[in-house]
Amino acid sequence: MGLKTAEQYVASLRDGRVTYWDGERIDDITTHPRFRVPIAVASRDYAYDDPKAAELRSFTTEDGGRAHRIYQIPRSEADLAQRVELMYHTSIVGLVSGVYMALMSVKDAVAKVNPQYAANIEAMYRHARDNDLRAAEVITDAKGDRKRKAHEQDDPDLYLRIVKRTDEGIVVRGAKLHITAASLCHELVVMPTKGMRQDETDYAVSFSIPVNTKGVKIINRSFAPAELNEFDYPASAHHSIPEGFVVFDDVFVPWNRVFLAGEVQLASIFAQSLGLWERTGGLVEAVRMAEIFVGLAQLVTEQQGKDRDPIAQNSVAELISYAEMLRMSLDYACRHCERTPSGMIHPNVLAVNVAKYYYAANYHQMMRYVHDLGGGLVITLPLEADFRNEESGQYLRKYLRSVPGVEAETRMRVYNLIRDLTADAYGGWQFVVALQAGGGLNAQRIMMHRTYNMAAAKAKALAAAGA
């Protein structure tokens, strides 16, 4: 089919998918007010006629067609750098479609165990690429009692599992939680949430199915208020994307869409592959956000007339250090990229995990600096309606005056962005996402231990000790 237009993307969502929001089953998400902003956000990725983004957003495939660059398999450091640049200009709906990079990165390992699964991965990648589809990363299980393994739960469905195998395919039951943009995508790419044991074969499962497959139900929520005002919510009004609980109620998956069905030795490989690309996307967003925080901190201090105050300067310097450490980590991860046996390039695994850990472990401290500089006005600033009201607005214009040359409206816009990004709708979501997206801090610690060259470090220590 080739590249879609934004209009064709919207039309493709009218496919009978079963999705809920705020207690309501929504038959057509394209006309529902709750999905107005999310669909507008996702549609921007289909603006191929935008001359500023056309070259970055698409590429020519080996068959001579055009496809979204999110599907371009990096073969060189330059390809990887271009992919990272694309991430700065792509919605989260486009970014999660990078799940196919995770699949393609494990294809070689899968082929050694089951060549047909590897062929299925290749076929699904091409199907999604050539039809300009978007796919959700569907990985986190409900998990139930965390002290118990998957097969030890009181309810065996608390981890997604295979309940039936036939000559035509498999039937799965369970749920996957925290699935970003599930209702806005075309495909659900399911992977194991972790490694599985030999007695957990039914839980080692990976596949891709259309969102409107019978038995799939998505329950949505969002950080954003139902009614968004761009003045009061400058971030949420442009970034609101629903998170979904995706339920699989005895869902049939044909064999040609199955990538894993009981081969427990591959389960952890699938889970780790998605973690790498998700953390890379998170690192790109971390750099973008950190640089915005530096700008907001400096603007606030200047508007308060405190830009030469040593305490304020120290806080801004901490934010600069944070932003630059993240930027350098991202650059290092790309310049010291790694190659799979098939020639695919991916960011340095150790560098990405160290950077994601640094970002998450220090995020709350950085927000403390921003809030300390901003003061109470971050959460007490009146709304735009009060500012536009002739009677109340005169007082806001009078008492929000600060240094010469700064209009009250400009000051309000800066504070509204600080509040929305750090202390309100988008900010509350971001506080949790910074820590949990791509796995919590311990997930990165585990990967650091697995990938760091400890033998070399010990050898250097022994040499330094003269042993």
Image: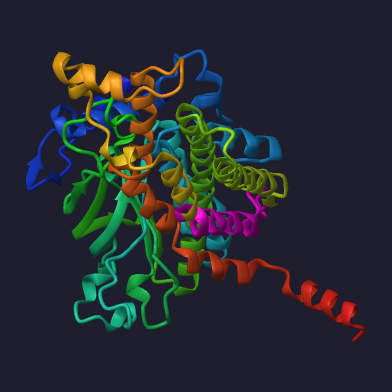
The answer to which of 198 and 447 lies nearer the viewer is 447
Number of labels in the image equals 0
**Residue 451 appears anywhere in the view:** yes
Query: How did the renderer colour the structure?
Result: rainbow
**360 part of magenta stretch:** yes
Q: Residue at x 42, y 25 (%)?
A: 2
The answer to which of 236 and 173 lies nearer the viewer is 236
* Predominant secondary structure, magenta span: helix
The answer to which quarter of the image holds residue 21 is top left
Residue 77 position in % (x across, y down): 70, 40
Q: Please determine whether, in this image, residue 358 is positioned above or below residue 94.
A: below
Most extreme residue toward the left is: 24
Q: Residue at x 55, y 26 (%)?
A: 59
Q: Quadrant of the C terminus?
A: bottom right
Residue 186 position in % (x across, y down): 30, 39
Residue range corresponding to the magenta coloring = 339-364
**Residue 119 appears anywhere in the view:** no
Q: Please determine whether, in this image, residue 304 is positioned above or below residue 170.
A: above
Q: Quadrant of the N terminus?
A: top left
Q: Please determine whether, in this image, residue 447 is positioned above or below residue 155.
A: above
Residue 274 position in % (x across, y down): 48, 55
Residue 120 position in % (x across, y down): 44, 51
The answer to which of 384 and 77 lies nearer the viewer is 384
Lateral position of residue 36 relative to residue 104, left or right: left
**409 part of magenta stretch:** no
Lateral position of residue 427 relative to residue 452, left or right: left
The answer to which quarter of the image holds residue 55 is top right
Most extreme residue toward the bottom is: 467
The answer to which of 412 and 103 lies nearer the viewer is 412
